[in-house]
Image: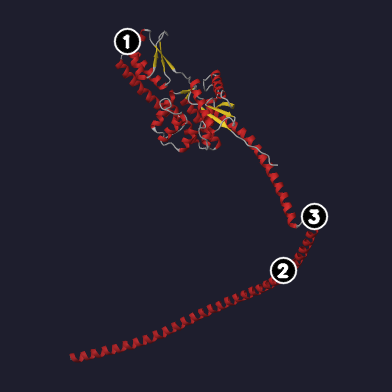
């Protein structure tokens, strides 16, 4: 029974399986048909799209071909036009060649006719014409040069006056009076005895330590300090005033006060030098240069304070340099340092220019500054604009009214004496004292002196000036011996 049921179950399963297989086969057939139909539709659609694109491209190609044909026709038309123009140009060119040949023949005939009439060849006529034109051009150029020179002279003189007057108006520095003595006021005449001391030991100690002469005479309540060194004189004055204020006057105390006075004066000189440099905007000066510059505060020349004079020269040179476009910083620095040798000439041998040049080289000043120092009195030729400005500013500062105290009578007497000494020798043609008496130029007769004789004459005149004339600084003696030979060629 069970076996029969299982067999029936198996048969039913088999039938069911066969049925589903058939259904699956039928479904597959249906799907294949549908897929085939869809593929055919897709192919048909794509074919239609392809045909449409092909048609559009063919239309585009056709349109492009039409444009190309149209352009080709235009190019052919233009080419034909160019060909026609070339033909016309060739004809015109042939005509021009014919005219050129005709004109060349005509010019040749005219040239031959002109040569026949003038009696000159074409080369000779060209040369004459060029010479005439050259003369005319030279004449015009000379006229222009002359007019420009006159204009430059007129305008430059006016401009120079404006610059100098403007510069001098900006510079106004007071001057102190030169003196070789200082007066120290005393509280009473009894103080004179204390200053002299027992057997003169106090006054001797003070004079020995300071190097200054103390003059104690009948002048009431005053002591005179005499020295050509203004720094020493100032140290002695300060020390003596301290001793008078302190009241204890003896050699040991004098030595202490002189030492303190020296320190104060050294500090004062450094401050004055620093103040002078800062007033002109000059930086990077060596401390020893500043200290030496400050010594000029106590140095005078013909009554003119040398430090004030140096500041004035720096200001003047800087102002002029600014107006003409020169180096303002260099002009101011050189103007401030141009007379720095005067701080050394009382303790060392040599002129203030020589000492100033050596000092500037020692403390690494530039070659331009050194040249300005050595050229400001024409010891060497000034070959820079700034060196010329220092010369001008120095002359302006020293020569303006009231700057220097040397009296007119003393000045004229010294100049006359120098010229008299120079002209007292035989064979002298003329002599001139120039540069405010700093140089004597002697013109000699060339037949009376040879080169060696001229050198001996200069040396002899210099020795007589040293012996007979009182003067500050140095005086240069220049002997000029000129020989001119002239002959006429006939």
In the picture, which quadrant includes the C terminus? top right
Residue 58 vs residue 299: left or right?
A: right
The residue to which callout 1 is attached is 199
Of the residues under marks 1 and 2, which one precedes in the sequence?
Answer: 2
Residue 65 vs residue 124: left or right?
A: left
Residue 29 in view (yes/no):
yes
Q: Nearer the viewer, residue 12 or 422?
A: 422
Measured as percent of width and height from the top left, residue 135 is found at: 71, 47
In the rendered view, tell whether residue 387 sits above or below residue 471: below
**Residue 412: numbered disc:** none
The residue to which callout 3 is attached is 118
Residue 3 vs residue 259: left or right?
A: left
Of the residues under marks 1 and 3, which one precedes in the sequence?
Answer: 3
The residue to which callout 2 is attached is 89
Determine the secondary structure under disc 2: helix
Measured as percent of width and height from the top left, residue 113 is found at: 81, 59
């Amino acid at each position: 029974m069970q076996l029969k049921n299982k067999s029936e179950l198996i048969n039913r399963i088999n039938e069911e399986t066969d049925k589903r297989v058939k259904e699956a086969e039928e479904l597959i057939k249906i799907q294949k048909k549908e897929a085939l139909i869809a593929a055919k539709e897709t192919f048909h659609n794509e074919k239609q799209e392809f045909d449409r694109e092909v048609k559009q491209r063919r239309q585009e190609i056709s349109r492009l071909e039409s444009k190309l044909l149209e352009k080709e026709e235009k190019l052919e038309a233009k080419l034909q036009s160019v060909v026609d123009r070339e033909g016309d140009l060739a004809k015109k060119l042939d005509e021009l060649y014919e005219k050129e040949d005709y004109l060349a023949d005509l010019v040749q005939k005219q040239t031959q006719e002109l040569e026949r009439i003038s009696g000159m060849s074409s080369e000779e006529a060209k040369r004459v014409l060029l010479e005439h034109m050259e003369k005319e051009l030279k004449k015009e150029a000379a006229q222009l040069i002359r007019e420009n020179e006159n204009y430059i002279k007129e305008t430059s003189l006016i401009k120079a006056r404006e610059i100098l007057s403007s510069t001098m108006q900006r510079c106004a520095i007071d001057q102190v009076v030169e003196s070789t003595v200082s007066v120290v006021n005393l509280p009473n005449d009894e103080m004179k005895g204390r200053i002299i001391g027992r057997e003169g030991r106090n006054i001797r100690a003070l004079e020995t330590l300071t190097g200054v002469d103390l003059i104690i005479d009948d002048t009431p309540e005053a002591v005179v300090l005499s020295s050509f060194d203004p720094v020493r004189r100032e140290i002695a004055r300060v020390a003596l005033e301290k001793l008078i204020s302190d009241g204890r006057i003896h050699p040991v105390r004098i030595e202490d006060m002189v030492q303190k006075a020296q320190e104060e004066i050294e500090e004062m000189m450094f401050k004055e030098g620093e103040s002078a440099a800062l007033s002109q905007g000059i930086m990077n000066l060596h401390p020893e240069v500043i200290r030496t510059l400050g010594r000029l505060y106590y140095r005078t020349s013909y009554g003119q304070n040398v430090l004030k004079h140096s500041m004035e020269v720096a200001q003047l040179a800087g102002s002029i340099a600014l107006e003409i476009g020169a180096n303002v910083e260099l002009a101011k620095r050189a103007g401030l340092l141009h007379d720095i040798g005067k701080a050394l000439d009382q303790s060392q041998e040599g002129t203030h220019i020589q000492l100033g040049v050596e000092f500037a080289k020692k403390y690494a000043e530039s070659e331009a500054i050194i040249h300005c120092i050595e050229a400001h009195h024409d010891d060497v030729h000034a070959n820079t604009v700034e060196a010329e400005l220092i010369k001008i500013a120095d002359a302006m500062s020293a020569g303006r009214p009231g700057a220097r105290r040397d009296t007119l009578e003393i000045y004229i007497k010294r100049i006359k004496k120098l010229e008299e000494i120079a002209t007292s020798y035989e064979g002298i043609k003329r002599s001139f004292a120039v540069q405010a008496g700093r140089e004597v130029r002697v013109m000699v007769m060339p037949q009376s002196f040879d080169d060696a004789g001229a050198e001996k004459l200069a040396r002899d005149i210099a020795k007589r000036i040293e012996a007979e004339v009182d003067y500050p600084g140095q005086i240069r003696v220049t002997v000029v011996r000129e020989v001119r030979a002239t002959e006429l060629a006939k």
